[in-house]
Amino acid sequence: MTEESSGPAAPSPTQVRRWRKYLADEIAEAKLYEDLARRKDGEERQILLGLAAAEQRHQQHWRDLLGPHAERLPAPSLHRVLLGQLARIFGSVFILALAQRAEGDSPYSRDEDATRGMAADEEIHEEVIRALAARGREKLSGGFRAAVFGANDGLVSNFALIMGMGGTGVSATVVLLSGVAGLLAGALSMAAGEFISVRSQRELLDATRPTQATLRAAPDLDLDHNELVLVYRARGLSPEDAEHRALERLGIFECNCRPEMSHNPEEVADEYEAVGSAWTAAGSSFCFFAVGAIIPVLPYLLGAEGLTAVVISTVLVGLALMATGAVVGLLSGASPLKRGLRQLAIGVGAAAITYALGSALGVTVT
């Protein structure tokens, strides 16, 4: 005896709740990309609008499954609400980095009610957002990198210095003076180091970049006796390609078959943008190291002493370390909480070691 088919089974209440949540999240994501697109132009705008259109296709899938249950949806996930608010206020690379994490955490690959195409879409969306965020990260690479790591270095090094001095039992005045000295010495050292590092990197780019010498010299070269082939072999071409390239320069061939072997002003500009300005990096390092280094000193500047000053300093530095770690986590597409806790563990660990060493020395300065 066979039963007549009665059509697809009605969804369970659990399924309906899950689908409604998915739909609310898809609507929020589409709105996020539309808000970001309004702040962009050209190619980036079109890419973001393309992502919004893809999210709308996903919305339709859940609407079709939900039928009459697709009305009066619940609020989207808190993460997506926060992303939407931040996008309207800030836009740019931070939100893209957070969106990258959201796309990477999609549950569709684990949910049989979502199609394989939707799961594949979410994987591709993560790569699209990764590429868009990479553009912003490159623009932030010079001064911003120096700012973030300068602040973190100031926090950790001066906090460790103050804890070490505090552990010796010296007066609050001596700890304060040590902290101020550490701030100035560290900020100047960081600024000088960043300036030299960035300037040296730019000089290395200048020294290694191909020049226009082959163009300038080609008209006067002997066709049978010249070193153009050696130039292109040194730049990485095979002997055959180098021979062909040399003949191009000598006017035998008219095509420019390997333009990547020539001087390209646009590539030079891109390289310089990625490296950043030496003065910007130095200034950012000095200022942000000083900002970070002043935080552990604040309790002593306000008159706190002994254990009270140590506790207040530890709390302030802990909060600041969590913040800088979270920023690095956001920019790298990693978990802000994990990166913040890692920074906190490193900073507090370094300070604890120096405090223990200071206590072991037991030196009292009169």
Image (spheres, grey):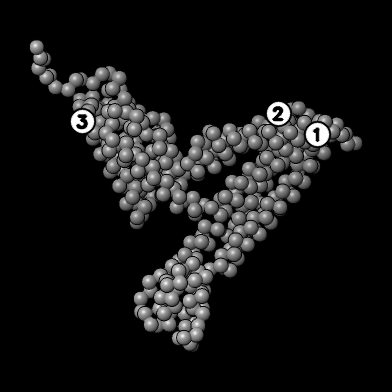
First in sequence, mark 1 or 2: give its number: 2
Q: Is residue 68 above or below residue 244?
A: above
Q: Say which amino acid is labelled 3.
A: Asp
**Residue toward you, 66 or 70:** 66
Q: Say which amino acid is labelled 1.
A: Gly
**Residue toward you, 290 or 158:** 158
Q: Secondary structure at mark 1?
A: helix
Inter-mark Cα distance, 1 to 2: 17 Å
Task: Give coordinates of residue 305: x percent, y percent.
Answer: 78, 31
Inter-mark Cα distance, 3 to 2: 58 Å
**Residue toward you, 170 or 348:** 348
Circle 3 or circle 2, nearest the eye: 3
Task: Give coordinates of residue 14: x percent, y percent.
Answer: 30, 19
Q: Residues within 10 Å of mark 2 (few under 14, many from 20)?
A: few
Mark number displayed over residue 311? 2
**In this orientation, does residue 84 appear?**
no
Q: Which quadrant of the figure contains the N terminus?
A: top left
First in sequence, mark 3 or 2: give its number: 3
**Residue toward you, 88 or 235:** 235
Task: Give coordinates of residue 59: x percent, y percent.
Answer: 26, 35
Residue extending furthest toward the front: 239
Q: Residues within 10 Å of mark 1 (few under 14, many from 20)?
A: many
Image check: 197 left or right of 248? right
**In this orientation, does residue 22 appear?**
yes
Q: Residue at x 44, y 48 (%)?
A: 133
Q: Say which amino acid is labelled 2.
A: Val
Image check: 195 left or right of 127? right
| Residue 322 position by quadrant | top right
The residue where tag 1 is placed is 358
Mark number displayed over residue 64? 3
Q: Is residue 226 above or below residue 259?
A: below
| Residue 302 position by quadrant | top right
